[in-house]
Structure formats: structure tokens, C-alpha cells
Image: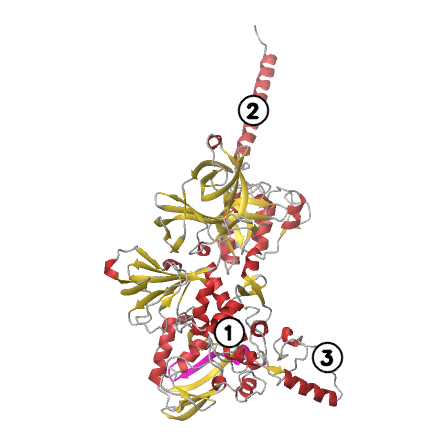
Amino acid sequence: MQFDGKQLAKLALIFFGLLFIVCLFLGRRQAQEKKPLQSEGERITVEDVAILLDALGVNFSIPSSDGKGQPQTGTEMAGEEEGIYFTYGQYLALCESLSAEEWGLPDYSDNYKPEQELLKEDWYRTFRIFLAYLDTESSVWETTVFVLKTDQEKAQAYTENGAVQGPCPYVSTAFEGSELQELKVYMKGNTLLTIVEVLPEDHYLGSVWVMENKDGTLDCFYHQTAFRAALSEEVRKEPPEREQIADLTFRDGRIVAAKERREKIHGKLLRASEQELEIEDYGVYQIAEEMEVYKLYGSLKTLERAELRVGCADMDFVVDKGMVYACLVSEEAGADQIRVLLKNTVAGSNFHETVGISVDGEEYRIRKDQMTVGERRTYRSANLTDKVTVEMEGSTRADSDYRGSIECLRMEEGIALINELPLEEYLYAVVPSEMPASYPQEALKAQAVCARTYAYRYILRAGIPELGAHVDDTTAYQVYHNIEEHAPSTTAVKETDGVLLTYEGEAAGNYYYSTSCGTGTDVVSWQGGNGEEVPYLRGVRVSGVHREERAEQESKDADDGSSADGEERTGDWQPDAQNGAEGAEQPGARQTDGFDAESLRDEAVFRQFITTVHETDFEKDEPWYRWSYHVEELDEKRLLARLKERYASAPAFVLTKAEGDYYVSEPIGKSGEIKRIAIEKRGAGGIAQELLIETEKATYKVLSEYNIRYVLCDGKSAATKQDGSETVPGTLLPSGFFVLDTASGAGKDGENVVGYTLTGGGYGHGVGMSQNGAKAMGEQGADYGQILSMFYPGCEVTDAEELREQ
């Protein structure tokens, strides 16, 4: 076939036209390939961006992704549609609004077009830089949590991971559906903000209580949280049984491995240290790292290890190869037995080298080197009413015959002596040791209730669990067996059998002391201002009106036209109206002198109070009601030494003034001459709370009444009671209720403090019940309930059995 010239020209034109179209297409395709495509990966939502910016206090209006709509806040935009994503253009606008050019933010311009959505990893890389510049207080922090379950109605996640344990409120809706997964998250306080990523690692929970096994799922309980988990196909073949302990491994929201622990022993818990448990008849078991304690009766609950009841026999222990993995408390244990550590008071130790035991006509001499470490020997009479006689080296105890049993436990340091006996019988030897048996019966009853309540709380949570004791026999807890049993004290115990002092349904933490100055203080002031307020341990005026005085007052009121309430009272005693609402509501109560615990914080008011004898104060005739302490010649070296001693024991309570107007805890340096000593702050009731000591070279501040009493006591000057008798305090001043006056003399550089005089009142710390106040009230006809109401306002007396049922 032949083509003429015209045809060839047409063909050439068609060929070059097609070639041009192909080149144009390829050029455009190559240009498009040079522009970024949407990156693969999880994208960050506007909701999460808004949550994090709000947590940082950033007020930012997010422009619409197409640039045409009106700017909105992140919260508004996130609320329009779940899952709406944050674009690169919005990201650029945010960075510009923060003026973050100098922050070294990542450059993503080669990765995104403005309308494309930002990946999570890129957002969080930038957000970590935001934190460094915008969150100077580190209030927003990154951590990992394992979510057991979520409650969408309450927006709470029940989490488990070290310090972060639920329920925790959450903000991002991404937490819904995150159950049984380990997450990297951002938090602020206790609030979960957003999920950074779901971690791929398996998560292990040891010693989980399996409540039910049904339809391929387990209902479980762990750290106060009940949750349901699906089983993998492999675990379904041999799942854990119901009401057993199991170790569980989770992956992708399911249980992928389960190990059931079925071996159990039942026995009495004799002692519990941080590393081991000793179980009667079974010996010592090490505590597994994942050991849990479950209360199975009543409402299912996880208990703290410190709540393990030493001396309790109502427990099963889940064990494996010498380790305890769980403790199962199946019944409410009674609190009618107490275990008391008998200390070596001569050596100031918990341990003895040699002990003598006499029981049922047999005598035993036990030496430390005759026993192997961990060995325990128990001695008790065959007759319940007979006692065991204990001879301890150097002991000066007036009564060495003990009720109950005596255990000799050989530890590395020596022999620990434990006396186990009924709580009520323990009180027979505590009450006379803490309050003279000659005091009025109602005062002894009040003391018995206080002593019982104090011991009861330690039975619930042992004070010396590592040695298997609830308390010891010294003033560190309650003095026990310092004095022989006395019939009046025993009668007081029996007549209040099982009665506890309670506040809002729980045993009250009660304290008591010898003598008030006419007022007490609160627990916060006692602890140097650092403790938590306790509603019933507050400063009260230890003052009231006797019935005869009331009658006289009512007669005077009638003469001057005033009216009395006319209500009849069952007791002879009437409380002072200044002890708060409780006292003010009592019929016939009246204000006596205008002083109350709060007004006595003022220095001038307290000075007026403490230098006066108040006729309505219950203890106005007690020797320690008022006292003075005079240091003729101040020993600067001795004062400095006592400061150093208190710093060594309680460094947070002995402070040194730094450059500027603040104080720091640091070792005590040189002092030189003393320039000034003064009480800088008083607590409730006027108790000394802060002592200032200005020296030639440094200024010190001593906090808390105990430390102040220690520092100002020189160990050689006498305290003179109001009856003229004298005593020399060895280590502590009688109380922290005093005013301080200094004597000055010429020094190398102006006036120095050369001595001081304290005018004070009371004996003891001033918190809770004054024992001599209780005595005076008993003498005036108050019953033990009225006495306790006076010193512990808001508390009630409750039978222990009733409390247990509650």
C-alpha cells in the first residue's frame, strides 16, 4: 500500500499529537507523585488534641480543615462528630498561635499537605516539646496503665499499674473499649486524658480471685475491681475453676494463659514481716511478690497486707513451693485475743538473752544459745485461771505472773517473748498501770474503755507484726504489768465489758495524758501542724459547772430576772459551753471565763490564761495544774547539743534559716551566743507549736510541742508545781503549755539570753482525755459516758459485738 504526501503528512501529525498527549500525561503523573500522599498509620483526633491543650491551659480556636468555615475551639469541633481528625493545616495554625518558632518543633512539610490528617506519633512528638515549654509544673505526665474495665456512664476506668490504680476518671472517648489492654497514656492528677498507644506486650496479673467460670469467660476480682474477661481457645481447654486463685496473662483484651493455684493450708498466723509469714504447725513461708489478701465474707474486698490479722486462725493460705501467693479470709475474726511483746526494759530491746519460766510447778531456764533461729516454745498452764511466771533479766516489774500463754521465739537478735491472752484480761493489768486504782470508779471505767479501744485498733492492724505482736508492754503503746492488778480497776473493766469508743461506726483513735492546764489541744497542733485533723481530737476546755454551783447561778439569774432552761439532768456534772456545739447544747451549761481553744492561740490571750487559776477548771487543785521552770544560767553548748539530738531524730522538725526568709532542714552548725528565744506560733489551746532560737551565727526553728519540750529542758533545773513541790525533768518539760520569759545579759555583741523562765500548766501532750480531769469529773458525779463525751466530742460508746456486726 502506497501513501501520497498528504497522507504521510496526516499520519505524522497524528503520531506527534499522540506523543504530545502521552508526554503531558506522564509529566502530570510525575508531578503528582512528587506531592505527599496521606501517610499510613493511626491519626490523632481533634478531640484528643483539644483535651491535651485544655490540660495545658491553652485556649486555641481550631480553623476548619478546608479553611472556609469559622474557627472553633477544639472542644466544639470534637463534639460535632466522633473520630474527626486533626489536619496538618490545623497543626500549623496551632504552632503559629503559640509563637513556637524557637522551640525546635519537627518539620513535617515534606510529609503532609495542609488538608491531610496528622499521625498520632507525629502529634505526640510535638506535644512532648509543648510540655517542656508550657507545663513547667509537670502537671501532665505520661505513664502506662492496664485497664481492667470501664464505666462509660461515670466516665471512669478501673486501672491497675503500680501507683495508678482505679477508678480513675477519663476524658477521651478512646478509653471506651480499651478494657484488658496495656496503654501508654497522658494523665493530669488522677485523670486519664488520652491514649498515646496500645502497647503490644502481654500483661500479667498474679493471684487473681476467680469468681466464676462460664461460657468461655472468667468473672474475676482484683484490687477492689470485679471484671469479666474472655478466654482464648487454648485456655478454654483447661480453664481455672471458680472460687480459686489464678495467675492470668492478657493479650488483645483476652486471657491467653492461666495458671491455677490450688494448694492451700489452714492455720493461725503467728507473725508477718515484709518478707515472710509464720503459720502455726506449718512454719515459715516466703511472701511471693504478687501475694494478695482477699476478704471473702460479706462484701468481697482486697485487703492491704498490713491488715493481715496476727493471731487469727480463720484464714487459708494459697501456697506453692514454700511461697504464699494469697491469703483468703473466710470469716470475720474475733478481736478478743491480744498478743503483747514483753520488752527487755533494762537493755531497751525487744529481745532477751535469758528467760526463766515457771508454770504448773515446773521451772524452765531458756538461754538464747539453747534455741535455733526460728524455733518457738510455748508455755501455758493446764488450768485457765492459773498464770505463768516470767523472770526477765534485770526486770523491775512489780507483777511477773502473766495470764494466758508465753511464747519464746528465737530470732537472730535473741529471744522475743510474746504473751497471748484474752483482751479483757489484758486490761486488768493495763488500767492500774495507766491510772491509779484509787480514782473514782467512773474515771476508771472511762480509762478501761479508752484502753480497750486502743488495743482493739492494734488487734485489727498489728503494731509489731514482724514479731507476731499487736503491741508491746511499754509507753510506746500501753503500760502493761507495771503495777499489780487491783480490784477497782478489774471491776471497771468488767463493768464495761466489750465497750468501745467509736466515731461514725469505727473504733476511735484515742489518746490520753495525765493533767490539763484547763485546756487541751488538737491532734494537728500536737504533731507540729503536719497531721490530719481528727474531728473528735480537738482542743477542749477542761472546765465545767457542778450542780451546786448551777443552783447558785440559777438563783442569781432568777434574782436579776433572767430565766433558766428548767430541764432536769441525770448527772451532777455540767459541761462548759465553750467546748463546741456539743457542750453548748447541754442544758444548764454556761460560759465561765471567755477562753476557748481557738482564742488561746493568741500569745497575749494565752499568757493571761496560763498565769491565772480558773475556779471552774476541773483540775485547779492538782499540783501539775500550774508549774514554773527556771533556768538560771543558760548553757549554750547544752542547748545546741539538744538541738542536734532532735535534728538527728526528726530532721523535718528542726529547721535552719537560709539566705532569705525561709527555713530548710539541714545539720545544725555552730551557734555562738544566744540572742533570742521565743515562741513564734501556738496551736489550739495555746500549746507551743514553733520555737525560734536566734544565735550569733544562725537562726533555728523547732517544730512540735515534743521537740520544744525536749530542747528547752536542760536536765538539771527543777520544775516547781503549784503546791511548792519540786522535781527535775530528765528529758522533757512537763507540757507544751507555757509562756517563756528570757533574762538578758551583756555579750560580745550586744544583749544575749543568759537564762529563761517558763510559766506553764498541765502534764503530758494535751490530746484526748486528761486522766486527772476524768478523776475530778468522776468526783463531781459524771458517769464514764459523760467523761468520754467531754474529751472526745462526737464519739459514742458501742459494744464490740455490735460494731463487728455493723
How many other residues sit within 10 Å of disc 2, few (<14), some (14-19) or many (≥20)?
few
Q: Magenta span covers which residues?
A: 684-701
**Residue that carries the numbered disc 1 in the rendered image:** 444
- Tag 1's secondary structure? helix
**Res 724 quadrant in image:** bottom left
Report the amino acid beneath label 2: Val
- Tag 3's secondary structure? loop
Report the amino acid beneath label 3: Gly
**Res 357 quadrant in image:** bottom left
Residue 270 in the image: state x and y as whole percent.
38, 55
Instruction: Out of 548 and 582, give the one closest to the viewer.
Output: 548
Instruction: Out of 468 and 320, give the one closest to the viewer.
Output: 468
**Residue that carries the numbered disc 2 in the rendered image:** 22
Q: Is residue 179 magenta?
A: no
Looking at the image, which residue is at 63% across and 73% down?
582
Mark 3 or mark 1, which has the lower sequence index?
1
Q: Name the mark nearer the viewer: 2 or 1.
A: 1
Give the spatial CA distance, label 2 vs label 1. Answer: 111 Å
Res 531 visible: no
